[in-house]
Amino acid sequence: MSEEKKKTAREIIEGYDGPPVRIMEVCGTHTHEIFRLGIRKLLPKQVELISGPGCPVCVTQVGFIDEAVYLALECGVTICTFGDLVRVPGTEMSLAGAREKGAKVRIVYSPVDAEQYAKDHPE
């Protein structure tokens, strides 16, 4: 490839001259790094970054994990959750730790999967 065809990421970003684009960063870490590296300042006006909902690991509070562990261990509730949330630590343990103690923790790939599980297991 000739030297004139090679471009840096910065040149590609700053030189974008296409139609308007909206890009959602769904992870808080992505949002943080985009800000830290000054990427937003490099983007042309037709490129819009939207901060998304955040992945479960980034946005779930410890109290929520504690509540899910309690419901699973003490109340016998089956917890349906995304796989990356299973190892997020609570105050005393994660859902993986609760599962090791006999709790029912099911990994789902969408809220629809959890809804279907509830319909199939009304107890």
Image (tube, rainbow, N blue to C red):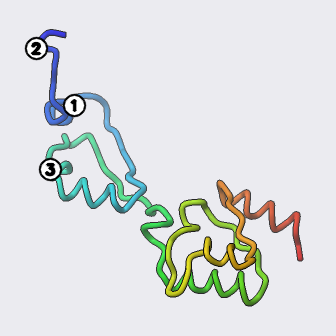
Residue on which the image places disc 3: 41
| 105 and 2: which is toward the camera | 105
| 6 and 53: which is toward the camera | 6
> Farthest residue toward the bottom?
74
Residue at (19, 33) in percent of width and height: 9
Find residue 52 and report its horizontal and vertical position in percent.
42, 59
Task: Kindly state the secondary structure of the residue where label 1 is placed.
Answer: loop
Distance in Å between CA atoms under marks 1 and 2: 19 Å
User: What's under tag 1, amino acid-wise?
Assistant: Tyr
Do the residues bearing badges 3 and 1 touch, measured as CB atoms within 8 Å? no
Q: Quadrant of residue 47?
A: top left
> Which image quarter is the N terminus in?
top left
Which label sits in the foreground, 2 or 3?
2
Distance in Å between CA atoms under marks 3 and 1: 13 Å
Q: Is residue 11 left or right of residue 25?
A: left
Mark 1 or mark 2: which comes first in sequence? 2
Residue on which the image places disc 2: 3
| 123 and 23: which is toward the camera | 123
> Farthest residue toward the front?
100
Residue on which the image places disc 1: 16
Q: Residues within 10 Å of mark 2 (few under 14, many from 20)?
A: few
Whether residue 102 is situated above or below residue 36 in the rendered picture: below
